[in-house]
Image: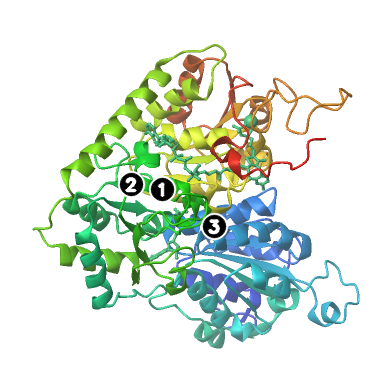
C-alpha cells in the first residue's frame, strides 16, 4: 500500500501536501457521502483502504454489478447519490449494467471507475485493461465526466452529484485515470478546491396556470383515478400525497415501488381492482409514473381501447419533473412540470377543504370490485396445498411483513415477483424495492445489502430461484458484514416453472430447468449464516420469524410446487409467438 497522505497539522513538507486519493474522499465526505459500494483492484485498491482509514464505510462485493445495484438503490432510499467504485475495463463494464438500470429507473447514482493511462488508451497501444470508458458510458447514463487534474476533483464530484440528483435523477459516470490518484498538490489549495454542493436538487415550482388547468380537469371528472409511481415515493412528499388522496376522495393505484406511500390496506386503494379502474377512469392524475410498458403506454385494451393501440378516452394530468415526459405516449391534457413535493402542495392549496368528492357510483363500484377481489384472494391464501405453492408461501410472507412494517422487502423473479406484489401488503413508503422499469433480474442481493446498510432494518428478499442466481454469491457479503437479511428463495426448479422437457429427449434438460431440489440453503451455511429448508408454510414461518428475531443472515430454501408458475408470470403476452409451427 502506498503512503497514506492525510493533511495533518504537523508542519512537515509531506503534511502540507494532499493527493488525488484524499481529494476524492474529502470531496465525497464534504458532500455527505459516507458509504462506498465497490470492489477493489488496480487502480483503486488504495482508494478503498484509505476510504476506510478516513472513516467512510466501504462495502466490498464479489461482483461489481451487485455493488452498482446497491449504490443505485441507496440513491433511491436516501434521495442522494449512491456511489459505486470499480476497477477499469471489465470492472467498469460489470458496474455499467447497474448504472444504466439506475438511469432507466431515475435512481441517483455515481459510478466511479479507475481507468488506464490516457495516452496509451487513446493510441490503442494495448494498455492493461485498456478501454475508452468515458465514451462507452456516455449513451448509457445521464452524464459522464473525466477528471485529469487533482485540482479539478472538487468540480468533478460536484458536477457528478448535481447531475445525479437534480431534475430527473439518474446515473452518472465519473472516470478517474490511475495517474490522477497519485498527483499531489498543496493541501490548503486542495481543500479550497473542493465544493460543498448547495441545494443539489433544487425545487422546481409548477406554473400557477398549469395547476389551475389540472384542478379544472380533475373537478370535471366523473371517474377520477390517481396513479402513484416510484417517482412519488422518491419525492418524499408522503404526507401531502396522502392528504391529496384523502381530501379529494379519489381512488388511487400504486405502481409496485409506490406501494406503501399510503398503506396498501387503505380503503381508497384500487390495487385489487386494477383491471377495472384503468379502462373505466375518465381522468387520471399520474404522480411520478411514466406511461411506459408497465402502464400499457396509456392506451389499448388495458385502458378500454378497442385494440392494442387505440386510446381509451381518458384524459391525463401528469406531474413529472421532466417536461419531455409529457405526450411521450398519449396526449397529456394537463401537464404539471415540477418537483412532486411542490406540485402536490400547490394542488392541495387549490383543492382547499371544500373539494367535492367523486360521484359515489364510481367510488362504490371501485370499492365493490376491490372487496370482491380481496375476498377471493383471501380464500386462495387460506388453502394449504401440498406441495406448497406461491400463494400458501406468500400468505406467510404477508403476515411477517404486516408484523414488521419497518422491514425492507426486496423482490425479483417472474411469478415470485408478480405474486408477491399483489399478495404482500406494504405499510410504509420506500420499503418495497424490486426489478423496476426494466424488469431486470440480478438486483436481489445488491439491493438487499444496501437496504440493510442504509436502513438498519431487517431485510426480507423474496427471490425466484433463477433471479437469485444472478447475484447469489453475495450471500458471502451478507455474512461478512453480518447483515440482517433473510433471503427466501421460491424454489420451483427453474425459470417460471421446473416442468419443461427437452423436445428431443436428449441428456440436456430444457433451457428453463435447473437441478431439481437444489439445496440453496447450504450456500448460506458455507459462510456461517443460517440455512433453512422449508417445504411447508409452518417451516417457512418459523424460519422467517427466527431470522427477523435473531437478525442473523439467513437463507430459506422454500420449496414451491414446480408446476405452479406461468410463463413470464403476468407478462406472458410479451413473448413473441412463433409465426411458423415447425
Ligand atoms: O384486476 P385484476 O383482476 O387484473 O387483478 C390484478 C389486481 O387487481 C389483483 N390484486 C389484488 N387482488 C387481491 N388483493 C390484493 N391486495 C391485490 N392487489 C392486486 O392482482 C392482479 C395483479 O395485479 P397487478 O400485478 O397490479 O396487475 P398486473 O395486471 O399484473 O399489472 C401489470 C404490470 C405490467 C404493471 C405488472 O404485471 C408488473 O409490474 N409486472 C412486472 C413484470 C416484470 O418486470 N417481470 C420480470 C421480468 S420477467 C422475465 O423477463 C424474466 N427473465 C428474463 C431476464 C431478465 N428479466 N433479466 C435479465 C438480466 N436476464 C433475463 C428471467 C430470467 S423473469 C426471469 C426469471 C424467472 O424465474 P424465477 O425462478 O426467478 O421466478 P419464477 O417465475 O418464480 O420461477
Ligand atoms: P413507475 O415505474 O413506478 O411507474 P417510473 O419510473 O416510470 O415509475 O416514473 C417515475 C417518474 O417520476 C419519472 O418520470 C421521473 O422523472 C419522475 N420523478 C422522479 N423524481 C421526481 C420528483 N422529485 N419530482 C417529480 N418527478 C419526479
Ligand atoms: Mg423459479
- What is the C-alpha distance between the residues marked 2 and 3? 36 Å
Q: Is 367 placed left or right of 229 in the picture? A: left
- Quarter of image, res 457: top left
The first of marks 2 and 3 along the sequence is: 3
Crowd class of label 2 (few under 14; some 14 to 19; many from 20; radius 10 Å): some
| Up/down of 555 relative to 252, above or below | above
Label 2: state its secondary structure. Answer: helix
- The answer to whether the residue labelled 1 contacts the one labelled 2, judged by CB atoms less than 8 Å apart, is yes
Disc 3 target residue: 72
Q: Quadrant of the N terminus?
A: bottom right
Q: Establish whether ligand 2 lies closer than 8 Å to the Cβ of label 3.
A: no
Give how far across and how far down residue 468 sits, in percent: 63, 37
Residue lying at the far front in this picture: please name it.
Answer: 306
| Up/down of 285 relative to 206, above or below | above
- Quarter of image, res 560: top right
Give how far across and how far down residue 355 sits, in percent: 12, 57
Disc 2 target residue: 280
Disc 1 target residue: 304
Crowd class of label 1 (few under 14; some 14 to 19; many from 20; radius 10 Å): many
Instruction: State the colouring used for the structure image.
Output: rainbow
**Residue sitting at x 44%, y 71%:** 322
For discs 1 and 3, the disc positioned in front in the rendered view: 1
- Quarter of image, res 17: bottom right
Q: Nearer the viewer, residue 390 or 224?
A: 224
The first of marks 1 and 3 along the sequence is: 3
Give how far across and how far down residue 263 sits, in percent: 30, 41
Label 3: state its secondary structure. Answer: helix
Give how far across and how far down residue 190 sits, in percent: 56, 84
Q: Report if residue 9 is visible in the image.
A: no
Amino acid at each position: 500500500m502506498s503512503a497514506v497522505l492525510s493533511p495533518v497539522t504537523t508542519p512537515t513538507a509531506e503534511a502540507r501536501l494532499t493527493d488525488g486519493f484524499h481529494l476524492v474522499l474529502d470531496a465525497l465526505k464534504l458532500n455527505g457521502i459516507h458509504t462506498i459500494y465497490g470492489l477493489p483492484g488496480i487502480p483503486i485498491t488504495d482508494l478503498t483502504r484509505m476510504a476506510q482509514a478516513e472513516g467512510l464505510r466501504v462495502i466490498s462485493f464479489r461482483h461489481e454489478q451487485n455493488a452498482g445495484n446497491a449504490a443505485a438503490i441507496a440513491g433511491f432510499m436516501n434521495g442522494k447519490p449512491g456511489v459505486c467504485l470499480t476497477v477499469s475495463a471489465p470492472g467498469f463494464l460489470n458496474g455499467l449494467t447497474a448504472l444504466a438500470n439506475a438511469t432507466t429507473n431515475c435512481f441517483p447514482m455515481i459510478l466511479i471507475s479507475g481507468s488506464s493511462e490516457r495516452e496509451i488508451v487513446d493510441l490503442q497501444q494495448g494498455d492493461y485493461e485498456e478501454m475508452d470508458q468515458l465514451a462507452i458510458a456516455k449513451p448509457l447514463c445521464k452524464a459522464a465526466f473525466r477528471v485529469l487534474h487533482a485540482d479539478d476533483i472538487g468540480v468533478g464530484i460536484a458536477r457528478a452529484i448535481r447531475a445525479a440528483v437534480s431534475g430527473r435523477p439518474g446515473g452518472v459516470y465519473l472516470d478517474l485515470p490511475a495517474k490522477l490518484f497519485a498527483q499531489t498538490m498543496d493541501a490548503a489549495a486542495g481543500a479550497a478546491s473542493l465544493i460543498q454542493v448547495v441545494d443539489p436538487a433544487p425545487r422546481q415550482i409548477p406554473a400557477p396556470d398549469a395547476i389551475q388547468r389540472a384542478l379544472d380537469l380533475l373537478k370535471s371528472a366523473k371517474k377520477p383515478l390517481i396513479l402513484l409511481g416510484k417517482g412519488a415515493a422518491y419525492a418524499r412528499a408522503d404526507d401531502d400525497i396522502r392528504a391529496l388522496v384523502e381530501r379529494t376522495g379519489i381512488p388511487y393505484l400504486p405502481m409496485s415501488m409506490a406501494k406503501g406511500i399510503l398503506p396498501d390496506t387503505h380503503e381508497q386503494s384500487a390495487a385489487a381492482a386494477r383491471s377495472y379502474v384503468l379502462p373505466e377512469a375518465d381522468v387520471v392524475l399520474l404522480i411520478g409514473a411514466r406511461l411506459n410498458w408497465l402502464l400499457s403506454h396509456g392506451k389499448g385494451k388495458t385502458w378500454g381501447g378497442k385494440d392494442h393501440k387505440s386510446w381509451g378516452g381518458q384524459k391525463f394530468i401528469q406531474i413529472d419533473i421532466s417536461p419531455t415526459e409529457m405526450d411521450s405516449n398519449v396526449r397529456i391534457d394537463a401537464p404539471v412540470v415540477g418537483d412532486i413535493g411542490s406540485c402536490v402542495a400547490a394542488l392541495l392549496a387549490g383543492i382547499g377543504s371544500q373539494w367535492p368528492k367523486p360521484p359515489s357510483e364510481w367510488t362504490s363500484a371501485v370499492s365493490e370490485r376491490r372487496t370482491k377481489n380481496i375476498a377471493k384472494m383471501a380464500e386462495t391464501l387460506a388453502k394449504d396445498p401440498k406441495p406448497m405453492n406461491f400463494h400458501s408461501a406468500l400468505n406467510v410472507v404477508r403476515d411477517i411483513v404486516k408484523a414488521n412494517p419497518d422491514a425492507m422487502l426486496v423482490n425479483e423473479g417472474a411469478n415470485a415477483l408478480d405474486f408477491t406484489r399483489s399478495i404482500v401488503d406494504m405499510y410504509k413508503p420506500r420499503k418495497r424495492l424490486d426489478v423496476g422499469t426494466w424488469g431486470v433480474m440480478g438486483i436481489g442481493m445488491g439491493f438487499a445489502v444496501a437496504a440493510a446498510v442504509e436502513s438498519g432494518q431487517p431485510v426480507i428478499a423474496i427471490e425466484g430461484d433463477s433471479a437469485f442466481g444472478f447475484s447469489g454469491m453475495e450471500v458471502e457479503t451478507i455474512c461478512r458484514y453480518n447483515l440482517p437479511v433473510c433471503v427466501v428463495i421460491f424454489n420451483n426448479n427453474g425459470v417460471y416453472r421446473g416442468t419443461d422437457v427437452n423436445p428431443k429427449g436428449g441428456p440436456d434438460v430444457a433451457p428453463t430447468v435447473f437441478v431439481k431440489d437444489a439445496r440453496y440453503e447450504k450456500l448460506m451455511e458455507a459462510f456461517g449464516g443460517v440455512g433453512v429448508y422449508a417445504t411447508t408454510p409452518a417451516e417457512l414461518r418459523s424460519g422467517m420469524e427466527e431470522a427477523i428475531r435473531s437478525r442473523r443472515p439467513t437463507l430459506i430454501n422454500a420449496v414451491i410446487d414446480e408446476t405452479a408458475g406461468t410463463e413470464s408470470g403476468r407478462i406472458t403476452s410479451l413473448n413473441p409467438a412463433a409465426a411458423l409451427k415447425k
